[in-house]
Structures are given as C-alpha cells and as structure tokens.
Amino acid sequence: MQISKTIKAHLALFTVNVLYGASHIVAKGIMPVHLTPSVFIFFRAVGATLLFWLTSLFFIREKVEKKDYFLLAICGLFGVAINQLFFFHGLSLSSSINSGIIITVNPILVVLLSFFVLKESITATKIIGIILGGTGAILLTLAGGSGKGDSMLGDFFLFINAFSYAIYLVIAKPLMKKYQPLTVITYVFTFGLLFIMLYPPTLTEFFATKYETFTPEITGKVIFVIVGVTFFTYLLTMYGLKFLSPSISSSYIYIQPVLVVLFAFVFSAIGLADDYTQTITLPKIFYMLLIFTGVYTISKTKKKI
C-alpha cells in the first residue's frame, strides 16, 4: 500500500524531533571533556554551511538582493551564533533533561515577540497560556542546581538559547516569504559562521583541542550532530512543511522532552552517554506539565504565525 504524502510528512517531522531528542544526550557526552562548546559549535557551523551551499548550488540558484544582506546577517547572529553558543554552553553546564524541557517555551516566546515586532494580536487565552508556560520555565530554571547535573546558570543559558531562536523565527518571516527556505538558511548559516569565528574563544580553543584523543565513537557523534541534527533535520522540516501547516509542525516540539528522557535511559543503559536520569524529579515533571499546558493553550488559539 502506498503511503500518502501527509503521512510521510508526519514521519519526517517525527524523525526531526527524534534526531533533536537524541542530540541533547549525544552532545552532552562530548562536552566539555573532548570538545569545548565553542569548538563544537564551530564544527557544526562549518559542516552545515558547506552542506547547505552544496545543496543550494545543485538544486536552487537564487539571487539575493543586496538590501536583504543586513537582515540575513541579523538572522545569522540570533539564529545560529547566539542560539548555538548559549545552547551548547548551557548544555555543558546543565543536564540534557533540562535542555529538552526548556526548549518547549519557544512557541510562547514566538507569540510574545510576534505581538511586539509583527503587531500580531494576543487573545486572553494566549495570555493564560503565556502565564502558565512562563511560570513553568521560571520555576524550572530556579530549580537548577538542586541536584547532580543541574545548573541554574546552565538553565539560564538554555532559556537565552530558546529566546534567541524565537527572535530568529520572527525576523526571518519576511525573508522566508521572499526567498526559498534553502536560500535563506544557507545565508543565515554563512553569516552565523562568521559571527562564531569572531567569538574570541572559538579559534583559540580550536587550535588547543587535542584531536589525537578522539576515538571513533567521538568522531561519529560529531558527524551525527553536523549531518543528522543540523543538515538532515532542516531538509526533513522543509519536506514536512510542504504538506502540513506550520502549527502542526511546531506542535511536534511537545514530544522532545519525552524523547530526551527516553534517550537518557537508553543511552545510559548501553553506555553511550553518562547517566543524567537522576535529574528527573517530581517538581520538574510538574514544571514540564505547566509548560506543556501553556504551549498547548496557545497552539489551540487561532493565530497567524
């Protein structure tokens, strides 16, 4: 029986979130022993930028107007540089469980920024959702440092990561309407890579890294993050958006914390990652439910995003 395009789109988006969920555990296993967060980000940006350029040159040749370069650069700053720097630095300090939960506040931040930047309306129901989700995120951040593998600073960095990516999603909307998504992301990663290289510790730590200590397992994990979690996830997301609405696509973010917890148990059991399952506590589950409820409440309202 032939699988419909809609089902394939759902499978694509589910695969994207499986890869993202696994990356929280995999990336945590590499930092900071083998790679510093800055060097890991540098590898990811270089690899992804090359792959996006190769793909765009073969499939899409689209000219970008000079007046749009500045906005593309700002998108690179928030969507790649700040976003990734704070994510990997936050992940190196906090637990992979916390990172999977905090990322779910992104839709809430997008709604708030869309109100202030794009002047999109916020209903009373959305306000309730924002309050619920925001409360859960704040309580989860304050809970950081209460157990092994937790860090309040790390959780704060992860929140900045989510906030930075929300800014990117909002300011990139005009570009996405004007150009092909692959064209936009190619230039965004190019500018993002330049900003990452301008971050002082990046090249210093890159040349100080002891690459002779890399095992095949570590090398494989780095390649997985570059190719699987960066390049393929974006291509699969584009495929999913061809046949499904953005609201359905964004709803898949709800399953990330569940997948992160699942991978935390599986990877620790087979010895591919350290055990961070002890950071799962009843208060955190409650905070996660608050965030879920807030995001679900917002997503059920009619919106233009």
Image (spheres, rainbow, N blue to C red):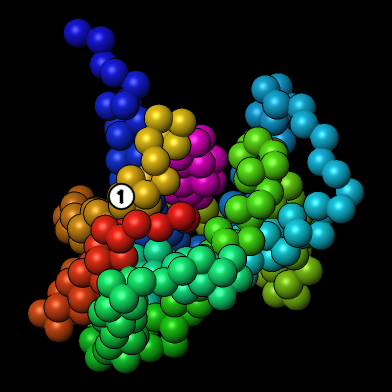
| Residue 202 visible here | yes
User: Main structural element of the magenta stretch: helix, strand or loop?
Assistant: helix
Is 160 placed left or right of 278 in the picture?
Answer: right
**Residue occupying image coordinates x 82% and y 41%:** 64
- Residue 85's image quarter? bottom right
Q: Helix or strand or loop: what does disc 1 sit on?
A: helix
Residue picked out by circle 1: 252
Instruction: Specify whether residue 293 is painted magenta.
Output: no
**Residue occupying image coordinates x 55% and y 58%:** 169
- What x and y, as percent, mark residue 162? 47, 69
Is 297 placed left or right of 171 in the picture?
Answer: left
Q: How crowded is the residue under tag 1: few (<14 C-alpha within 10 Å), some, or many (20+)? A: some
Q: Residue furthest right?
A: 66
Eyeballing the image, is 179 above or below 39?
A: above
176 and 92: which one is in front?
A: 176
Eyeballing the image, is 111 above or below 258?
A: below
- Which residues lie in the magenta part? 219-238
- Residue 302's image quarter? bottom left
Eyeballing the image, is 280 above or below 16?
A: below
- Residue 299's image quarter? bottom left
> Which amino acid, mark 1?
Tyr
193 and 111: which one is in front?
A: 111
Instruction: Specify whether residue 234 is painted magenta.
Output: yes
**Residue occupying image coordinates x 25% and y 62%:** 296
Tell me the quarter of the image containing the N terminus: top left
